Structures are given as C-alpha cells and as structure tokens.
Image: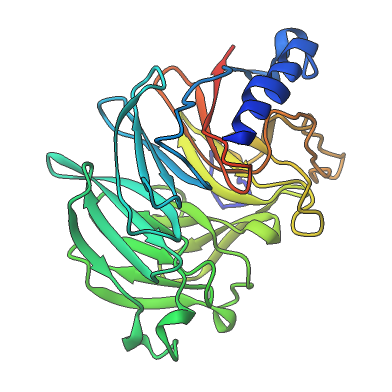
Amino acid sequence: MKNAFGQSRRGFVGSVLGGVLGASVLRGEEGKGGVLGQGRFRYRPVPGWGVLDEETPVKNCHGIVRDREGHLILLTDHVANNVIVYDAAGKLVTKWGTEFPGAHGLSIVTEGAREVLFITCLQTHRVVKATLDGEVLQEWRWPESTGKYAKEAEFKPSWTLHLADGRFWVLDGYGKDYVMRYDAEGKLEGVMGGAEGGIVQWGPHGGMAMEGGAEGASLLIAMSDQQHLLRLGLDGRKLGQVELPGGNPRQIREQDGHFFVAHLADNWPTDRASRGFVSVLDAKMRVVSNVGGSAPEYGEDGVLRKMRNESEVFVHPHDLVLDAEGSLYVAQFASGGTYPVKLERV
C-alpha cells in the first residue's frame, strides 16, 4: 500500500535548563523519570548539555548539524559568534562568524573528502558555502536573472536542500516562496514554486532532498504555518502531502527510515506563547511519536487528530539533529537565548 507520497515503504537558560526543564523532569510530567514521547521513540532530557558562559552567547538557535567527527555545529543569529561547535559532551570546541545577523538555515554537505556548510542569511539576502572553520568558499545573492524579484530585499532564503551529486535547491521561505535550483557548480538552473506554482506564502521553510522513492529523487519540504509536509518532484510537480494538524513543521531530518520533524509550536502564529514538540514519522509518513507532545491518534478514517504540546521542556523547536546513538539535539527559535536541548533515547 502506498503512502501519501506515493512510496511503497542566558537569563532564560537558567530557567529552562535549571528550572523549567529540571522541574518537568523531577515531576515526571511526561511519564516515569521525565520520559518524553511514545512507543519506541521515547527520550529523556539531559539538563545542562551545551550550556556555555556569557562569552559565547546565543540569540535564536536556528540550525544544527553533526559532522563526521561527531561535533555538533550550531547556527545562531548572535553576531558575537554565529557558529558554535560542540564536542559530544556539550563542551565548546570553537566558534566563528560575525557576518550573519539573519543567520537561519544550516546544511552540512560532503564534497569529495571534505565537509562544507551552507548558511542562509535573511538580513543579508544570501546563501554562503563555507568550510567547517569558517572560510567562505562561495556565495549566492538574490536571483535577479529569474525576473521574479524587483529588488534584493525581496529575497530571504530560509534553507538549502542537497542531493549527493552536488545539486541543491534554495527555499525562499521568508521572501516570495520560490524554490531555486542550482547545479553542482553552483550555477542557477531554474526556479519553481511561488504563488503561481502553488506554493502558499509562509510555507517552504526547511526540508531535505530525497534520493529515492517510487517517482525518483524529490524534495520533502516542511511547510511551517501550513501545517503539512509537501513533496515535490525536481521539476516542481506536486507528488504528495502529509497533514500534521496542530504542528508547525520547520525542519525535517531522517535516520534509519524515520523522519524527525521540529514543530515550532502547536498554535502558531495565532498564539505565539504556545509551545512546540518533535514528531517522529515512519516510512509510511505516519506519526508514531510526539516528543514533548500528545500521543499521535488516528481516527477510523485514517486522519491524524490535532496534536499539541504537553511539556515545558521545549519552547519553540526550530531544527534538530541526531547522533549515532539516536539522541536528539534540538535548536530553538524565540526561546530566550536557550542553548540546544539534548534528549537521550531510552
């Protein structure tokens, strides 16, 4: 049976990690021992992981990735240090970057023998490729040649999606909702989406390029305020959609056949004080666990019932990454300068 995608298969730091998070764990609000999630995907928060001193501040923690050495790389829009690199224990390895006041999307890509970072910046209207230690290798400004933009300020790229052969796509999630396609050398090849392409505003935020599937390579896009995941063919053709009622999907990561989705909040933007959670979806795109949220419930009609936050551990999850042991690391937006939250799988 095919699924919906056509596939066969600082001040605040103390309060959150030392107060709210600690209190949640001690009270056991999510079950015995402060465990979050359901079924096979249950996690226990690790208080204090990644908390640094005032010399290494964060503002909004937008993106987080893991390199092959096991380092966790965090992107923040605090220009004292846009990129913060942690070791597995949550200790500072290095930090760099002061030129991304609108730092937002972070992708890590393997190019031959090296790994590189792709950073999107909303305020400088650009995409940058850099080495892991901060050397800028290439950058892309607004795609003026497409004729879709009257001025640079209209282009506000949210994330980049990458295939293994080097091709990549740029989501203009805070601008005009277009998706730009580039070849492996970084040459602009085309544009799709936008209002005329059926992409709703305040939709394409983050996502991933998928190598396989019944219809070949595709893009899986987290549609934020639209509360669903959208799968597009590389030509922009809509291949499927997965509804996530009550969620606000900002980014998607995949591990061992499961998809992990960071939801900013359960009632955003209507209630900006509402909190978020992390969903785990199986290969058939059915939610099997909500970490920090209500247990997923499907009706007899197969429709997912509205999900909601049920924990104070998270404020506004924005991105996440997993390590080899399956632990989650969650970066948060508009959460009072909160460092990443680590959750160990139990």
The front one of 5 and 332 is 332
Residue 138 percent across, percent down from the top left: 20, 63
| Residue positioned 21% across, 42% down in the render | 133
Residue 94 percent across, percent down from the top left: 28, 33
Q: Is residue 13 left or right of residue 32?
A: left
Q: Is residue 272 left or right of residue 3?
A: right
| Residue positioned 57% across, 84% down in the render | 196
The front one of 70 and 83 is 83
Q: Is residue 205 left or right of residue 249?
A: left
| Residue positioned 37% across, 63% down in the render | 169
| Residue positioned 39% across, 58% down in the render | 160
Q: Does 119 sit above or below residue 300?
A: below
Residue 122 percent across, percent down from the top left: 46, 66
Residue 54 percent across, percent down from the top left: 46, 34
Q: Quadrant of the C terminus?
A: top right
Q: Would you identify the image quadrant in which residue 302 lies? A: top right
